[in-house]
Amino acid sequence: MKNSGGNAKLTKIKAIYKKEMLDLLRDKKTLIMMVLVPLLLYPLIMMGSMLFSSAIANSVQSDVYHIAVVDDAVGSDINGYDGRAFRQLLEDTEDELEYHLIIEDIPSGECAEALSAETIDAYIDVTASYAETDNKNVFTIYYLSSKSASSTAADMIEDKLGLYKDQTTRWMLSTLGIDNPDALLDPVTVAFDDQSANEERVGRLLGMMLPMLMVTSILMGAFYASVDATAGEKERGTLETILTLPIGNDALIIGKFLAVSTVAVASAVLNLVSMLLMSIYFYAVIQTEDAQELHMNLMDFVPALMIVLLCTVAFALFISAVTMCVTTFARSFKEANNYATPLMLVVMFASFVTFVPNIEFTGMLAAVPVVNISLLISNILVFTYDFSVIMIVLVTNIVYAAIAILLLIRLYNSEEMLFGEGGTNIQIFTSRKEIKGGGVPTMSDAVLVVATALLLLLYVGSVVQAKFLLWGLFMTQLFIIGVPLLAVWYTKRDVRKTFSLRLPKPIWVLGAVLSELGCYVLVIAVSFVLGSLFPQDTQNVNETMEYILDGAGFLPALLVIALTPAVCEEALFRGYFFSAAQKRLRPAAAILIGGAVFGIYHLSFVKFFTTGILGLLFCYVVYRTGSILLTSLMHFMNNAVSVIAIYYPEKMQSLVPLLFQESLRGGEILVLMTAGTICLAAGLLLLRSGGRRQ
């Protein structure tokens, strides 16, 4: 019976998969992104860009530029300047530069006017400089940087002056009786002998560009298929029909997921094939032009490409599941585009990790989504095989995909998610007269408010902080709380519910203090680990804090660094955003997203993890107690310790010496994490023992 039930479920999954694939293959956008773009558009873009660049370079080289020379006040008494010879050098088209410069005969007083009228592209003013110890000629190039022809002519004149300078130097050395001026001008010869094989050099170049192109192509292929399978069903009105069929949500989701994954994998494979064909074509061109220029065995890349293909398939499964989770929230293709844009930006930004110099591909980075596949492709193409890291990349992508699928199934079990209207519309753009008061913000409003606050932080906060330092940071915090307050007023939300304003029980206060202390110790341990992996990022954070606090007293620093964020940031993240997330999402998803958003807000790779951990704890406390006052207390305690450590380092070092150590051994980190976990667990138990908020 169990076997027949399993076969029936498999049959339903196959039916859903077949139906979704037929729908996707009928969709022109999916076919374009899956087939046309990789096989036709990418090669055309690459070849077209090369031809276009070559044409521009040839055009710049062969175009004629009109210039003038002003040297009325210069004689031959300084460094043997010869105006006639100098003009011949500028107009010479058969030297190593092969520039086409024509000198116009223009009176010196009219050159500036001619340049403004663009009758000439640039002019040179040669003047004599008589110093006490050194007499020389000064060549000033006048040009218009806003005009491409003038800017190009100025660059060409600079190159010509380089030749003139070299000639003049050799002449002066000869007049001093030096028979071999080259030995004096170039006494040292530097030679490079690259011991890397040609295959490794080519692999390094491919490893920088290929990950970004592959990640982008997989994301684009999965996106259009995901929209059609989720939001497209809602927009066409066919979702209700499918849900009435005798098919469980798990079978329905697996069937849709397999169809979307097929498109994403096909897009990735076709992109890989297209890039390989283009690489082979360019290799053949190079070999035709110069057989000795680049000799390599293309078969050496086969094992690397097979591993890349395998890991790319696993990554496509993950991206497909995540994209489906995002597009499920939308009710139309247009809305899905809005939701997917931040995902695309994050994924594409993470793929740029291959351009970071000297980054070490460790086991920890092998577990970071997007980053792991990008670094793996980059390392594999230079034939660096670490099979333990490869397995981590494969397993983590499959695990992440499975988690996303489980989340997707739970989303499809929510009728409000599939058919509800209240959680998705943006009420901020609605006329205030039409808004009904009460309740908490919609998820769309919450995302918009957080995005607005983040933009203000980036573009306005950075300016005021650079100008006013500590008080600029205070003004930034006012922006952060001002945006949600304004949104609450305009949309007539319930202030008490939106910001979780509830007096906590005494036992909750004790639990919050203990859990904050435990979490703080855990964050210290994580900071030491991340600091060893990303020392530059940690150093930048410390230098920024020292710059902002320059000259500030302890009490102002405590006010701005500890108290103000405890009010303003909590109002935005654990108040406005988390209240909307709790209404729309399940508790675990709301807490996870709330912590991630709080980590992203701090705009630092290291602080993303440390503040993200704090964000998770703060969201859980608000979920359990309904009181933002507790998280404000915890936030204040967390930041206050840092301020005290900066202003009273000796006292803090005697109390907590671990804060001032540059590094910790593995055993010390383990002890820290154990102590932090025990303290955190005790605090969470006290929070649970106080009962649950209604």
Image (cartoon, rainbow, N blue to C red):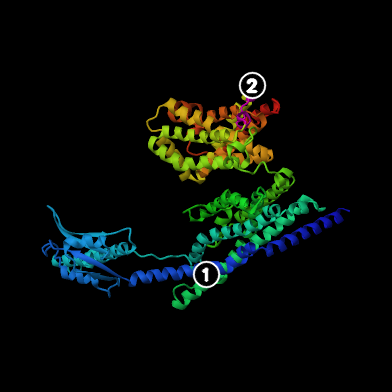
Name the mark nearer the viewer: 2 or 1.
Answer: 1
Please tell me whether residue 529 is drawn above or below residue 242 in the rendered image. Answer: above
Single out the residue that lies furthest toward the right.
1
Q: Residue 500, image x and y in percent?
A: 62, 30
> Where does the magenta region start and end?
494-508
Can residue 498 be found in the magenta stretch? yes
Please tell me whether residue 681 is drawn above or below residue 21 in the rendered image. Answer: above
Mark 2 crowdedness (10 Å alpha carbons): few <14, some 14-19, many ≥20: few
Q: Which residue is mark 1?
A: 44
SS for callout 1: helix
Q: Residue 60, image x and y in percent?
A: 35, 69
Which badge, 2 or 1, comes first in the chain's sequence? 1
SS for callout 2: helix
Cβ–Cβ below 8 Å for labels 2 and 1? no
State left or right for residue 416 relative to residue 663.
right
Q: Which residue is mark 2?
A: 506
Q: Amino acid at mark 2?
A: Pro
Of 364 and 445, the residue lying toward us: 445
Can residue 72 be found in the magenta stretch? no
Quarter-of-image position of residue 298: bottom right
Does the image show residue 306? no
Does the image show residue 16? yes
Single out the residue that lies furthest toward the top.
506
Of 254 and 286, the residue lying toward us: 254
Q: Amino acid at mark 1?
A: Leu
Q: Residue 359, image x and y in percent?
A: 50, 52
